[in-house]
Amino acid sequence: MPDAAEPRHRLAALYQRGRARVLGSYEAERAVELFGAYIESLDEDLLDLPSRSDACWRQGLAYEQLGRADAAKAAWREALRLDPDHKQSRQALRKLGG
């Protein structure tokens, strides 16, 4: 019998693995991939998980660590498209002049 909580755990693990890489400033390329998979797979019915806009913001941070300013700005703009009140993305764009 399939575990109904399995998708939630799998998605939470994707997000946390990406988050750890961004916070630890290591494997930023892998963080970009992990957040991409999270964003693509997130079911909005799983309300207790981080939002797509939060994942876009963190993906932008990973791009920034890679020195890919244009990709970082695009990720933060996507976060703002999803959530116009996303403060962290707005601040990150201001910081990079976007």
Image (spheres, rainbow, N blue to C red):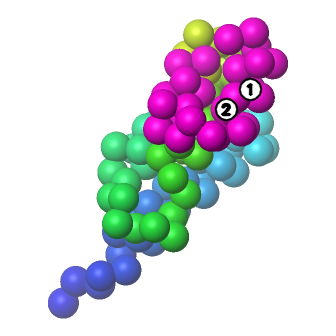
**Residue 19 vs residue 78, the one in the foreground:** 78
Give yes or no for contact between labels 2 and 1 (Cβ–Cβ under 8 Å): yes
Query: Is 88 in the magenta?
Result: yes
Residue lying at 51% horizontally and 70% vertically, measured from the top left: 48
Residue 86 on image: x %, y %? 64, 40
Instruction: Estimate the spatial distance between the alpha carbons at disc 2 and disc 1, rounded to whole Å.
Output: 5 Å
Residue that mark 1 sits on? 92
Q: Is residue 68 above or below residue 65?
A: above
Q: Which residues are magenta?
A: 73-98
Residue, disc 2: 89
Image mark count: 2
Q: Is residue 17 above or below residue 12?
A: above
The residue shown at (48%, 31%) is 81
Question: Who's the residue at 69% across and 51% down the image?
Answer: 20
Q: Residues within 10 Å of mark 1 (few under 14, many from 20)?
A: some
The kind of residue tagged 2 is Ser
Decide which of 89, 70 is in the foreground and name it: 89
Label 2's element? helix
Secondary structure at badge 1 equals helix
**x, y percent for residue 52:** 47, 46
